[in-house]
Image (spheres, rainbow, N blue to C red):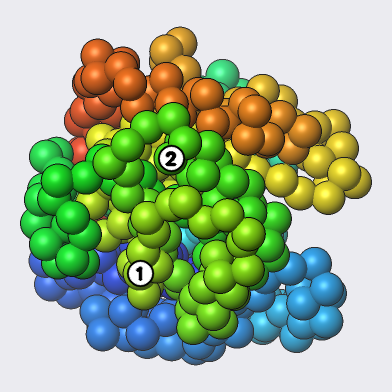
Amino acid sequence: MIRIGIVAGEKSGDLIAADLIRVLKQKHADISFEGIAGPEMLAAGCRAIYDSDELAVMGLTEVLKRLPGLLSIRKKIAQYFIDNPPDIFIGVDAPDFNLALERKLKSHNIKTVHYVSPSVWAWRQYRVKKIAKSVDKMLTLFPFEAKFYEKHGVPVKFIGHPMADQIPLECDTQSAREKMLVPQNKRVIGLLPGSRMSEVKQLLDLMLDTASYLSRHEENLFFIIPAATKNLKSYIEERITHREKNNISIKILDGNARDVMQASDLLLLASGTAALEAMLFKKPMIVTYKVSPLSYWLIKKLASVDKVSLPNHFDKEDPVPEYLQDQAIVDNIGPALLDLLRHKDKQEDICQNFLKYHKQLKLNASEVAANEILEMLN
């Protein structure tokens, strides 16, 4: 019997870990999993010592409030695995929790794997020294991450991205429009201000002003916005209603941002994972973001790259224009989107780059990760 310890801390980690568990079980019948698990991992056959909801905290104040409990859980789970050593331990994402746990277990001669690298290549690069002491192998989702770890002497394997396996290479825009009752005969622009109220409050008015700018310069435009929650939908509706001049055709859609991406010709979106999803749907986009002046200053001090969007890190092309902080104004974003809207050749070039990047990531990540882990066990 092979025993595997595993910890995932958020919904995305739960999904990735569950898929890995299923593939490993297919490859090796005599294998068991236990650790900190979410519902998907439980369904795949993992025994939960703690529920992954215990680790799912966001925001500095929330983390500080929950810190004693989180440290207690980490201490107890570490002691459990030291007393009952698994053949290998896999930490999935949740780097603030998992890397310290992996370091402790590795010091007791338990093999450790970290699946989904923190963005150490992009900011706070000094963390790589601690990572080297924590993991026997890092499994990365992006090729540029693997190059970073190789440079710093950390054993690494680029396995591709699970999202690239889920999203087809060709996007069915027409079906997405039919599903959401979006006009087929319009040029559709998706506005994605984020899934949190703080992000939406920072970016929504900017995006609506940009939509007004575009509508003054071009005809036949239709805008769509996803609302992740009822509260966000109410806020977005209120902001649109209170605008003095509302010259835009716009529809607010419940929930899934991916549907909005599929149905759109172009996207204006908040920086983050959404840019990766938009890339995989082959949608030309512009990225924007605003934070408090203090937060931006800190980020700039700790960052080691000058680009924030993941699609801009694959090669030297930089296919995604970025307008951040003081640059995030209609006078910049409006003309940039208008230029993209008017030049089909530019859109096609960007889509070809995105297709190339998608193929780089579409490696059947869970399969590659499972093979790597079984090889370490052998």
Q: Nearer the viewer, residue 257 or 377?
A: 257
Residue 212 bears which disc, if any? none
Q: Amino acid at mark 1?
A: Leu
Please identify the residue farthest to the top as the structure is shown: 316
Marks 2/1: CA–CA distance: 20 Å
Question: Which callout, 2 or 1, points at the residue further toward the start of the chain?
Answer: 2
Q: Is residue 106 left or right of residue 317?
A: right
Q: Residue at x 47, y 60 (%)?
A: 92
Q: Is residue 112 above or below residue 31?
A: above
Residue at image mark 1: 253
Q: Which mark is residue 215?
A: 2
- Depth order, front residue of 346/168: 346
At label 2, the amino acid type is: Ser
**How far across and down, in percent of the image, does residue 244 sit?**
63, 59
x and y percent of residue 160 in the render? 30, 39
The residue nearer to you, when weighing 49 against 140, is 140
